[in-house]
Amino acid sequence: SGKWTRAMAILREFEEKCRTPTSKLRQVADAMDVEMHAGLASEGGSKLKMIISYVDNLPTGDEKGLYYALDLGGTNFRVLRVQLGGKDARVVKQEFEEVSIPPHLMTGTSDALFGYIAEALAKFVAEEGEGFHPAPGRQRELGFTFSFPVRQTSIASGNLIKWTKGFSIEDTVGQDVVGELTKAMERIGLDMRVAALVNDTIGTLAGGKYHNQDVIAAVILGTGTNAAYVERAHAIPKWHGLLPKSGEMVINMEWGNFRSSHLPLTDYDQELDNESLNPGEQIFEKMISGMYLGDIVRRVLYKMAEEAAFFGDTVPPKLKIPFILRTPNMSAMHHDTSPDLRVVGDKLRDILEIPNTSLKVRKVVVELCDIVATRGARLSAAGIVGILKKIGRDTVREGEKQRSVIALDGGLYEHYTKFSTCMESTLKELLGEEVAANILIEHSNDGSGIGAALLAASHSQYS
Ligand code: ADP
Ligand code: MG
């Protein structure tokens, strides 16, 4: 019928706008490389903040002793302790605990939040048992993973720029978050020193490097997306401090904020951005990450329902609700292998309250999921190639067989198989067989917690 033709026209037009041929991805990778240079040249020189992390030493495997870590970045925080045994013994023992944050503390006072965290940490420290050996006469040391925007001022200090993810505590903004935590620990008599302040990307990079010395970058694909990598210190013009002994510096790219005229942006992306909490910001993130993919699919379905009666004569009301279709549900539909696409039918019925969909309709929904996921995965691969270009690892050099490993983590990468598979094959497509043979993606499962503890070890006051 005419309606079906019209619906398919909407789908095909969207597909066309989302196309990411190799040539376009190369332009995206080049643009990433250019913006990385610009962000390193001067403060505010690019949409990419290219934040200097003050991490100039990554774990080597020689780390020894008992270290703690605290991971705060959402509605839960994790405390962790690890006994490191050096080169041969590695991680001798490890324990962690997850603690949820009562909602009223997310919008209360700084003292109340950090007080609560310090109490939980003190309780965890008090339970330190067999197999953990604090060095006599030494203070316990902690790596603090704090995944909110911070203006870093040293390896163990940084001022909160703004809260995100539902936190809103006015009196913390502008404060040194390590100072806030340290004060709270002092108030309750917990004798512990924060040796390193990092975010989840840098934690993942450190955890990944400990596991495999060829790790040179880390990428998070979860609710949001970000990347960190090891840069040569003399390639950072905006750095006016002393050159670190290692000659290296870890850079937190904040790549979610990347944007370029080469990105295949559609009207749906534009509308999603306009209606978001941060219009004009995090454009790369809004095309790639788990918070948004499902909602892009919803927006196209809505258009097809409204303009082509795709789901019948009335537009299903639920389809109007932003973020009602979450990425894990999109992923479940995309992976449906049943002959009648039963999972797709169930999701459409249960989430969007659209009953009795035909197989023909379900197939279109799967195709739409594929278009959105494929674009996100291919753009992620282009971003990684941009990093490899920046550090000169996108080619094979004469007589060199240098391996480069990228540590990946995050729920999207971990659970959305079609996404991660596509990302990895695109990486090969862009790099070519010979180079790709030396580039490896490694899943760094929750490396960020242990990474922070390892960074506390390498930045210990005693080492
Ligand atoms: P965060 O990024 O919030 O620290 P995670 O790394 O665990 O947390 O990522 C969670 C995100 O991963 C979710 O918001 C969701 O978008 C995505 N995700 C989780 N499970 C799946 C799944 N099965 N399929 C696709 N995406 C998923
Ligand atoms: Mg996370």
Image: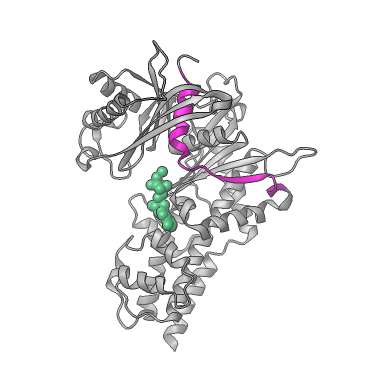
Q: Position of residue 137 (x, y in %)?
A: 39, 10
Image quadrant occupied by the N terminus: bottom left
Outermost residue toward the bottom in this view: 1
Q: Position of residue 307 (x, y in %)?
A: 38, 78
Outermost residue toward the front in this view: 130
**233 and 221: which one is in front?**
221
Q: Is residue 455 magenta?
A: yes
Q: Residue at x 48, y 78 (%)?
A: 8
Outermost residue toward the top in this view: 137
Residue 281 visible within the image: no
Q: Position of residue 432 (x, y in %)?
A: 71, 53
Span shown in magenta = 435-460
Query: Is 375 displayed left or right of 181 in the figure?
Result: right
Residue 103 visible within the image: yes
Q: How many marks?
A: 0
Q: Quadrant of residue 390?
A: top right
Q: Is residue 323 magenta?
A: no
**231 and 461: which one is in front?**
461
Q: Residue at x 59, y 32 (%)?
A: 231
**215 and 338: which one is in front?**
338
Q: How is the image coloured?
A: one colour
**358 and 244: which one is in front?**
358
Q: Position of residue 302 (x, y in %)?
A: 36, 71
Q: Quadrant of ligand 2?
A: top left
Q: Residue at x 37, y 79 (%)?
A: 357
Q: Residue at x 59, y 54 (%)?
A: 424
